[in-house]
Amino acid sequence: MLIRFTIENFLSFRDKEIFSLLPSKGTLKPQHKTKPVKGTSVLKTAVVFGANASGKSNLIKAIEFGKELILKGTKAEQPITFDIFKLDKKSIKENSRIEYEIQHKNKNYAYGFIFNSKEIIEEWLFEINKKSEIKIFERTNSNQYDFPALSKKNNKNELQFIEFTAKGTPRNQLFLTQIRNTNIKENVNDISDILNVIDWFQNALTVIYPNSKTVGKKFELLENTDLKNLFTEMLDYFDTGIDGIDFKEIEFKKTDLPDEVIEDIKNDLLSDKSEKKGAFLSNPQDDKYYIITKNKENELEAKLLKTMHKVVGGTFELFDLKDESDGTRRIMDLIPLIIDFFKGGNIFIVDEMERSLHPNLIYDLFDFFLEKCEDINSQFIVASHESTLLTQKLLRKDEIWFAVKDKQGASHLHSLEDYNIRFDKEVRKDYLLGRYKGIPKLGNRNKLTVLPFNND
């Protein structure tokens, strides 16, 4: 679970901003909170509202950036690719900062790093509790390390191996990445805390954009009949007009997937460190929908998903996904997310959740998650323009966030919890009127001089 995320000098975020999933003292909707881990509960959902270019998507990009930097790393002698805040000359010369506070494997951690395009300046990992913190490791002055907690768990030779690995970490590489890419686990007694954090990024956190094509995480392939029934029930529930689905086995190499997608799938499914058993994905080149799994020989297999529509006479006609509406294809992308959400232990961060979907469907999807999540520890974090979600009947005040830009173009985050409003007040109208900011400031249409207006 994500507890808090801190960002500074990254994309449109100039100043230090904190996105928090810590619940306030309010007692409403207690099922929206997880059971405490070492005294800390977190919220299971949050929605970030804001105008176009306010910073909503940049917040999500920042969260994904750390994940990609850990799991993929940076090539030797290559720059760390990212954009700082460019609208202030002071920011151009300053370093950037990202920190995650997370909950995983029944522990709470704070992991973060300070960096620029050339190197990692600082990096740290602490186990955090309400009244104390334990330093697992800290990296300062680019490549100076301190391992107080690890030195207590490992003998002298094992600690020397850890220190040797640290010294071999390139300046443009995170220590976590170096740990992930070496066989250090086989040479030391206990680095479980570091491995827990890596596992959170690899197997718990999923970021989904409007055009994301790979979906699904710890998907354990069900028997075909169960999977067909599950999809059929969900597609019927969402009123798609589809009467069922079917699978057609094909050779993986005949899917004609883009090279970068194939690489992502191989990394996700064939890695020894991955818990993923399969993946759902739609091919952007042919709008076909595939289920990819690995067999006992650790080879990838593919099945093409077809939708079924009843025709006159009681028979069924099979359709490719390209023959369905944009909204239906979006729902198909979300069904694996729904499956994994209710398995627990997953964090889904979705940008523009509302794309191609009816407002009533979006509202019902949130209501569905929150009604059934009492014993489920998963998170659903969304950036959206869909104002029908902006109601205290659905969400707590601390689950509603706004992204706004100041006059210098810097993004800021604040929560509805910052406002003194009653628990029963409907906030959507006030939001659209601008009380909570986060709405577009439109110009004066009478100042438009180029368009050929007809004023007759």
Image (cartoon, rainbow, N blue to C red):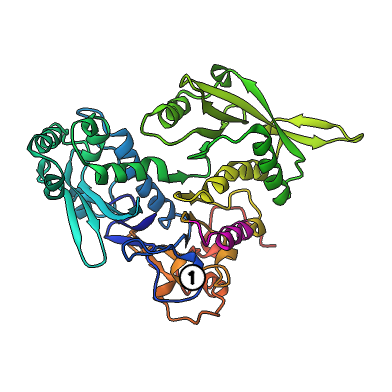
Q: Where residue 221 sits in the image (x, y, percent)?
A: 56, 34
In the image: residue 369, left or right of residue 229 = left
Bounds of the magenta segment: 362-376
373 within the magenta span: yes
Q: Which is nearer the eye, 296 or 383?
A: 296
Q: Position of residue 375 (x, y in %)?
A: 51, 59
Which residue is painted at 47% across and 81% down in the image?
Answer: 421
Residue in the image at 37% along x and 65% along y? 22
Near mark 1 (Cα within 10 A), the count class, few <14, some 14-19 or many ≥20, is: few
- Main SS, magenta residues: helix
Position of the C terminus, as image quadrant, is bottom right
Identity of the residue drawn at 66% across and 62% down? 455
Question: Where is 123 relative to 215, above or below?
Answer: below
Label 1 amino acid? Pro
Label 1, secondary structure: give it: helix
Q: Residue at x 10, y 39 (%)?
A: 155
Residue 200: percent from left, percent from top: 36, 45
Determine which residue is flagged by label 1. Answer: 30
In the displayed orientation, state which residue is furthest to the right.
313
Residue 414 appears in the picture as rendered = yes
Q: Is residue 438 magenta?
A: no
Viewed as shown, does residue 2 lie left or right of 350?
Answer: left
Up-down relation of residue 373 to residue 136 (above or below): below
* Observer able to see residue 79: no
Q: Count the numbered circles shown.
A: 1
The residue nearer to you, when weighing 142 against 409, is 142
